[in-house]
């Protein structure tokens, strides 16, 4: 008798290397204040009953938040992203070409206009 490991699509890491998976694990433990604030609203299926993952490996990237059912990636951009515009553009193009919708919010939006952020995310959910 052989046993087959069953992995649901929602938990796949989309070809992420072990290095990326390890980095994601570290990032889950060191989330920014804005990420923690948004996570408190997304976790435990609180938003439209959908399951979100945080710091989810996806190919060579790590998504801040990911919802498999909606094919949705949510990125929270802090000050460092002001100097990484080309990188962010390339990353977004890759994610979109992989079939994802990508939403980007600034830290300030999450910290000061959380209800607007939640309403915007909700518009992209089934």
Image: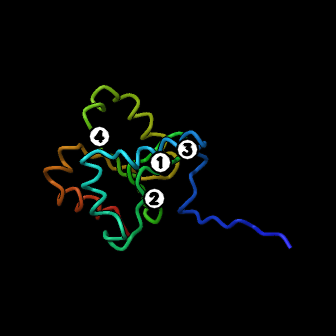
Closer to us: 38 or 123: 38
Left or right, 105 with reference to 2: left
Point out the image quarter for the C terminus: bottom left
Contact, mark 3 vs mark 4 (Cβ under 8 Å): no
Mark 2 or 4: in front is 4
Q: Which residue position is annotated with label 2?
A: 71
Residue at mark 3 to residue at mark 1: CA–CA distance: 15 Å
Q: Secondary structure at mark 3?
A: loop
Closer to us: 27 or 55: 27
Q: Secondary structure at mark 4?
A: strand
Mark 3 or 1: in front is 1
Residue lying at 55% horizontally and 60% vertically, measured from the top left: 11
Residue found farthest to the left: 112
Residue lying at 14% horizontally and 53% vertically, measured from the top left: 113
Left or right, 37 with reference to 45: left
Earlier residue among tags 1 and 2: 1
Contact, mark 2 vs mark 3 (Cβ under 8 Å): no
Point out the image quarter for the N terminus: bottom right
Disc sitting over residue 59 in the figure: 3
């Amino acid at each position: 008798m052989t046993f087959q490991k069953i992995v649901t699509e929602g938990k796949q890491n989309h070809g992420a290397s072990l290095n990326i998976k390890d980095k994601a694990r570290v990032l889950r433990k060191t989330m920014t204040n804005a990420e923690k604030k948004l996570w408190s609203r997304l976790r435990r299926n609180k938003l439209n009953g959908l399951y979100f993952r945080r710091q989810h490996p996806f190919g060579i990237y790590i998504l801040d938040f990911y919802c498999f059912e909606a094919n949705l990636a949510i990125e929270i951009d802090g000050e460092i992203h002001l100097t990484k515009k080309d990188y962010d553009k390339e990353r977004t193009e890759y994610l979109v070409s992989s079939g994802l919708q990508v939403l980007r919010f600034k830290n300030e939006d999450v910290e000061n206009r959380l209800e607007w952020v939640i309403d915007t995310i909700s518009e992209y959910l089934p």
